Amino acid sequence: MKKINLVGLLVVFLAGCQIVQPVDESAMSKLTPYITKENTTAPLENSTPEPEIESSAAPTAAPVIHVVALGETISSIALQYGVTIDAVRGANPDANPNVLIVGDELEIPLTDINTISAFDPEIARNVRFSGLNCVHSRDAGIWCLVLVENLGENDLENIVVAFSFLDPDGKLIEERYAPAVMRFAPAGSSTPVVIFLKTVPLNFINAAPSLFSVQVVDTAANLYLPIVVEEETRFLNGIEATISGKIRVESDKDVDRADIWIGAAAFDADGALVGVRRLDSVAATNEPFNFALTVYAAESSIARVVLYAEAY
């Protein structure tokens, strides 16, 4: 049994022997960034009433457009931007708060509302973006994937990235916002971010990511729980990679269950980020939890996979 004590970020799994196959365009439709154990397709239904979230910090004048990812709820989106659920609902009267569809756009009203985007500039200097890759989908949409690296000494969480879509002259066409795949980004780690637009912006030629909002982890809160890897196997086959195994969430607190996120980021031989997937589930603490996660490449062949996990 292999035991590795970790909080948040797991280890990097490199390809040993790779079977290279021609890229199958049908895999483009399988580049689903977020999945849950109970539901692997969008739309995501949520019939549970959303709790109210209080807003905090400095005001920003203009609204932003958030692109919905699978697994998100009105409350989780409101939390990312530090606004109230009612504010998000009021700005999007045609949106069904119980059925959010991947690729849908929600206006986040930040005028006269406090936001978390006013972060310490030192944090921004220690955040680096690498491996930006934008891939056109078969249904006239576009995926953009990028790796966010935390080079500072602080553990970070709730990262939201702004994607600026540019024309051939470098002028801004439009800007969209998306959260990091993983909630937790420890010091010295990286986490992927992926955004999907149903329609490619007119005259689009390039995209530029930037940090919109982020929070420093409150170590006193002790939110994240240690994870032990008990078993792990992987299989890479051209445009897809499957990682499965057994983990255990350790806790000496008076809790018997924990929310877990398990993510996988796939890279090609040139280091470009080509696929992302995430599994959301609930696990009993101090007991083995079996998982299996397959990530698909939008283009090229997968050369290595990075596995992430966090529990809280």
Image (cartoon, rainbow, N blue to C red):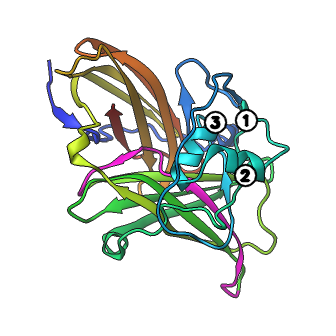
Residue 30 is marked as 3
The residue under label 1 is which amino acid type? Pro
Question: What percent of the width, then of the height, locates residue 23?
Answer: 61, 44
Quarter that holds the N terminus = top left
Report which residue position mark 2 lands on.
106
Would you say residue 172 sits in the magenta stretch?
A: yes
Magenta stretch in the rendered image:
169-188
Q: Nearer the viewer, mark 1 or mark 3?
A: 1
**Circle 1: is it few (<14), some (14-19), or many (20+) Cα within 10 Å?**
some
Question: What percent of the width, then of the height, locates residue 67?
Answer: 67, 52
Q: Earlier in the sequence, mark 1 or mark 2?
A: 1
The residue under label 3 is which amino acid type? Lys
Q: CA distance from mark 1 to mark 2?
A: 11 Å
Q: Nearer the viewer, mark 3 or mark 2?
A: 2
Q: Is residue 157 above or below residue 221?
A: below
Residue 245 quadrant: top left
